[in-house]
Amino acid sequence: MNHTGIIRTVTITGITAALGLATVVPALAGPLSTPSPGPVTTVADLDGDGEIETVTAQLTGDNDQVISATVHGTFTSIHVGADSAFPLEAPRVTDLNGDGRAELIVAQSIGANTTFFSALHYDGRNLGQIVDDNDKPLSIAEGGGVAAHLGYQCTPLEGGGRTFETVAAEADDISAPADRITYSGSRTVYTLRDGALTTQNTLPITRRPVTDPVLGTDAATCAQTGS
Ligand SMILES: [Ca+2]
Ligand SMILES: [Ca+2]
């Protein structure tokens, strides 16, 4: 359930492995601040059968990573963008439509205030990128600092399942006192099926305080349960 804990554990294991390697091969030892190039892993139930799979992310070059998993003995992998200026993070394990099968949210670009993610699904045989209404790979923005409010959330549907929602809003007046800054933009409500999103609704956001539920972006609401 606590994926953050798993990721931390894996990261520490990776660093320990790197240190072990450094003692054997001193020539490869770099400063401790050098990001570990080793793989990071998490667990997810990709096919929704109740058994978890190990998901591995590995930097393979400048701004490129490969995400891989083995489901019922069959290996699948996909290359997606990465930000090789930062230590690689394991994918976030989510269930964006609440069907019990995991979707993976993968950081591909990390800025000062905003991180951009791609999203992957498992179609029963392969990992593939989740696409939007226009058949373009989905890019999710999170963060924005004070100037913008960017993120995503999932909302349970009556009768089962979830909607996936993204929020993109800008501060109306960034010079206003911090507790009085309002945001305008939109909240887009999607359903996800077979790796493709369909826009169900686009809610305008007009001069709302960040505490307004229409600006709600609690990524934890998209977590896969039971994995
Ligand atoms: Ca499984
Ligand atoms: Ca799912």
Image: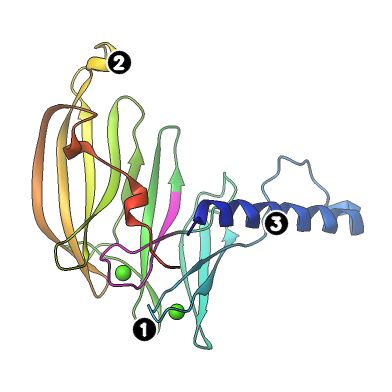
Residue 25, image quadrant: bottom right
| Residue identified by numbered label 1 | 124
Tags 1 and 2 touching, CB below 8 Å: no
Distance from disc 3 to disc 2, alpha carbons, whole Å, reads 40 Å
Ligand 1 positioned in quadrant: bottom left
94 in magenta: yes
Q: Is residue 208 left or right of residue 221?
A: left
Which residue: 71% across, 40% down? 33
Check contact, mark 3 vs mark 2: CB within 8 A. Answer: no
**Residue 205, x across and y down, in percent:** 12, 35
> Is residue 78 part of the magenta span, yes or no?
no
Q: CA distance from mark 3 to mark 1?
A: 30 Å
Mark 1 C-beta closer than 8 Å to ligand 1: no
Q: Nearer the viewer, residue 44 or 200?
A: 44
Q: Position of residue 27 (x, y in %)?
A: 88, 52
Residue 182: image quadrant is top left
Q: Which residue is mark 3?
A: 14
How far apart are the two marked residues, 1 and 2, measured between alpha carbons? 47 Å
Mark nearer the N terminus (3 vs 1): 3
Task: Tell me whether circle 3 and circle 1 mark residues in contact (CB < 8 Å).
Answer: no
* Some atom of ligand 1 lies within 8 Å of the CB belonging to the residue at label 3: no
Which amino acid lies under the numbered mark 1 shown in the image of this protein?
Answer: Gly
Q: Secondary structure at mark 3?
A: helix
**Left or right: 32 as drawn, with respect to 211:** right
Tag 2 or tag 1, which sits nearer the N-term?
Answer: 1
